[in-house]
Image: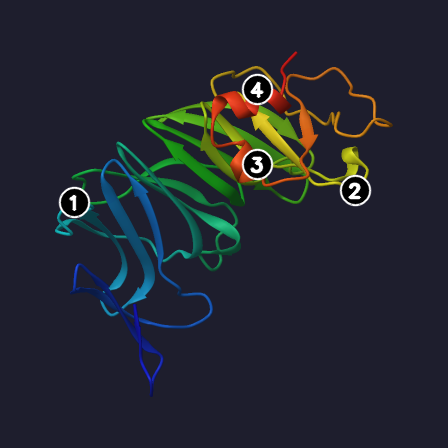
């Protein structure tokens, strides 16, 4: 990425070639995500309008160029079938009260609106042929969805966000949970992404003075690095249980 010294115009290069030039402001920063052997790049303020580009990771060749809606500060994720975008709470499309969840399939000339209901997406996590997204509607309705292709299934409905900085690894979703159930300590949450009927757990068994309540998964507070703990299934099994 090359920043303009005397203007707010910047340039993004891939494999030494110009991908696009864009107006570099606080709400126009480029986004990128990896999936299916490709890197996807999005920016709302290129000199050719909002664009989503797909490049081959092995060769760096441009494989797809898709004009997009004008999404400021969206969230972006990619998997084997394509890229997903949705407005974040900090961005979106001016004047719209509900946000669309977009899927851009590999080889498609435009995005598909998969769902339009929520105000924004808190996060998107993609793996293989699946997407998970937690959305917010108004200020108190939080929904966790799983999408296999365009087929969506609601996993959880709540009145507050349960998972932050979500990612996928060792066969499950991982994220930082609410600190309140853990006496102020930051818990790590594991969610079985294949189970559609289970709710997120408010239990934390890391502190001796905190009794775990019945739940579908267990929150724990780790004194070490959460990324190191979640990198393998065997390490995760040492600190996480399901009931």
Q: CA distance from mark 2 to mark 1?
A: 45 Å
How far across and down, in percent of the image, does residue 237 sit? 57, 19
Q: Are marks 1 and 4 in contact (CB under 8 Å)?
A: no
Q: Is residue 72 above or below residue 148?
A: below
Quarter of the figure that contains the N terminus: bottom left
Q: Residues within 10 Å of mark 2 (few under 14, many from 20)?
A: few
Q: Is residue 219 above or below residue 2?
A: above
How far across and down, in percent of the image, does residue 201 sit? 68, 24
In terms of sequence position, does the residue under pointer 4 or pointer 2 come before the other? 2
Residue 155 is at least partly visible in this image: no
Give the residue number, with chain letter if any, for mark 3: 175
Give the residue number, with chain letter if any, for mark 4: 237
Among the 4 quarters of the image, the one containing residue 79? top left
Q: Are marks 4 and 2 in contact (CB under 8 Å)?
A: no
Residue 221 is at least partly visible in this image: yes
Give the residue number, with chain letter if any, for mark 1: 58
In terms of sequence position, does the residue under pointer 2 or pointer 1 come before the other? 1
Among the 4 quarters of the image, the one containing residue 184? top right
Q: Position of 136 compared to 74: left or right?
A: right
Residue furthest toward the top? Answer: 243
Q: Which is more foreground, mark 4 or mark 2?
A: 4
Q: CA distance from mark 3 to mark 2?
A: 16 Å
Residue drawn at point x = 25 percent, y = 35 percent: 36
User: Label 4's element?
Assistant: helix
How far across and down, in percent of the image, does residue 196 sit? 52, 17
User: Label 2's element?
Assistant: loop
Q: CA distance from mark 4 to mark 2?
A: 24 Å
Give the residue number, with chain letter if any, for mark 2: 184
């Amino acid at each position: 990425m090359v920043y303009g010294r005397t203007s707010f115009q910047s340039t993004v290069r891939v494999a030494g070639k110009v991908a696009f030039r864009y107006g570099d402001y606080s709400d126009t920063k480029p986004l990128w995500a990896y999936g299916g052997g490709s890197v996807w790049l999005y920016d709302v303020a290129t000199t050719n309008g909002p664009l989503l580009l797909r490049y081959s990771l092995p060769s760096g060749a441009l494989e797809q160029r898709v004009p997009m809606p004008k999404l400021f500060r969206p969230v972006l994720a990619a998997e084997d079938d394509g890229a997903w975008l949705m407005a974040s709470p900090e961005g979106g499309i001016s004047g719209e009260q509900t946000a669309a969840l977009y899927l851009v399939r590999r080889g498609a000339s435009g995005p598909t609106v998969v769902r339009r209901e929520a105000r924004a997406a808190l996060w998107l996590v993609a793996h293989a042929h699946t997407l998970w997204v937690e959305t917010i509607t108004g200020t108190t309705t939080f929904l966790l969805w799983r999408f296999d292709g365009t087929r969506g299934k609601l996993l959880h409905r709540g009145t507050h966000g349960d998972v932050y900085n979500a990612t996928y690894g060792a066969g499950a979703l991982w994220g930082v949970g609410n600190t309140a159930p853990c006496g102020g300590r930051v818990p790590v949450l594991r969610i079985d992404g294949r189970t559609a009927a289970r709710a997120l757990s408010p239990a934390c068994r890391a502190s001796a003075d905190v009794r775990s309540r019945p739940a579908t998964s267990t929150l724990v507070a780790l004194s070490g690095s959460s990324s190191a703990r979640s990198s393998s299934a065997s390490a995760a099994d040492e600190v996480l249980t399901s009931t």
